[in-house]
Image (spheres, rainbow, N blue to C red):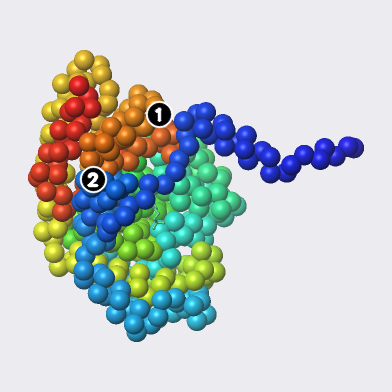
Amino acid sequence: MSIILSDPYGWLDKALARIHRANWHRSVQTIHSRPGPAVVLKQQNVLNFASNDYLGLAADHRLAVAAIAAIQEFGTGSTGSRLLSGDRPLHRQLELAIADLKQTEDALVFSSGYLANLGTVAALVGARDLILSDQYNHSSLRSGATLSQATVINYAHSDMADLATKLEQHRDRYQRCLILSDSVFSMDGDLCPLPQILAIAEQFSCMVLIDEAHATGVLGPTGAGSVEHFGCTGPVIQVGTLSKALGSLGGYVAGSSTLIDFLRNRAPSWIYTTALSPADTAAALAAIAIVQAEPWLRSQLWHNVSYLKQQLSRLFDTFNSAGAVPKLLPSNSPIICLQMPSTDAVLQAGCDLQQAGIFVAAVRPPTVPTSRIRLSVMANHTAIDCQQLVTALTSLCS
Ligand SMILES: *Cc1c(COP(=O)(O)O)cnc(C)c1O
């Protein structure tokens, strides 16, 4: 056998060239200011419709004060995993606050939402088990499913007939079964049919894990998320993040105390990683207190969402009646997406909007199946901010 002595890293250039050719190449855009409804991007003041900071808490001074106090008391790093030297009183306080918000027996905080999904899914099922996963689920749920070694079957997006059919066909050949779904889908903005998922899960004896990343602080009368929004009472495992409406960094799982105690013993991404930093923990704790004490933030957010949706559907009804794009995708959340015909078109629209002083996310495959402009609304956008967005989109379409 002959060995060809080629550069073992040479394939990287070719792979990158392929990414460029497909117009899939991505790079960062640096913000030079504090987060908020207006930010500084490339020395330009722009209105920010690209963040996940739905309640505007990432720049709230009360979170900063709490984080600074935590650094002064406990330092910058937590120095170890929770089970070794990393545990601080703030961690448990935060877990109890999450359990109180979610009305669950207990909760467990992870160093990110991604790690919470990885560790929880991998701990709940194994090689003899089955996962049914919505085709549009977040990357962290899909990676968790792979890590678990369970058999993974995707069902069509929010299609309950497909979910039931697939369970009928496959359920009895496996031991445990876990249904996975985002509650608010992160790149579409629509909401999973949670009551129906729970009914099907009961029928087929399945566990259910929903990802509340974009629902916590946003949906439900007290901001508890989609479970509260739908008034669901059945058992459901809730995973989420501290980094979106809660303006900090980290993730969590909320559920029964048995589940949480099990995860402390079996979730590798909780056991073998450094505990959440004191600053992040304290900021998230302050954010939950604000979410609970200031429901008007949520009212302002939803007021902005309905205003924008109304304006945009008026705008796009006119265009779409002529069969034109962009098309407004269905949404039940502050995430509003405009489907675009191609990667070129979405990149161009992103640039044009930026020139008009509006910062949006231009999302392309492979992140999503079809290119789209993703707008996310904040509680502290003003009516004028929203009008400027509508004006810019109007001139984009004409
Ligand atoms: C952002 C996000 C995550 C990951 O949360 P991080 O805390 O940012 O790691 C998980 N699931 C969904 C649906 C998300 O949108």
Disc 1 marks which amino acid? Thr
Residue sitting at x 29%, y 48%: 43
The image shows residue 317, relative to residue 133, as above or below, that is above
Quadrant location of the N terminus? top right
Which of the pair 211/104 is nearer the observer? 211
Find disc 2 in the rendering and name its residue.
46
Q: Which mark is residue 343?
A: 1
**205 vs 36, nearest the viewer:** 36
Quarter residue 289 falls in? bottom left
- Out of 80 and 119, give the one closest to the viewer: 80
- Cβ of disc 1 within 8 Å of ligand 1? no
Residue drawn at (28%, 57%), measured in percent from left and top? 33
Q: Secondary structure at mark 1?
A: helix
Q: Is residue 118 visible?
A: yes
Report which quarter residue 55 is drawn in.
bottom left
Q: Secondary structure at mark 2?
A: strand
The earlier-in-sequence mark between 1 and 2 is 2
Left or right position of 241 against 103: right
Residue situated in front as seen by the camera: 54 or 386: 386
Task: Please give left or right for residue 364 compared with residue 118 in the image.
Answer: left
Callouts 1 and 2 close, C-beta under 8 Å: no
Q: What x and y, as percent, mark residue 391? A: 15, 33
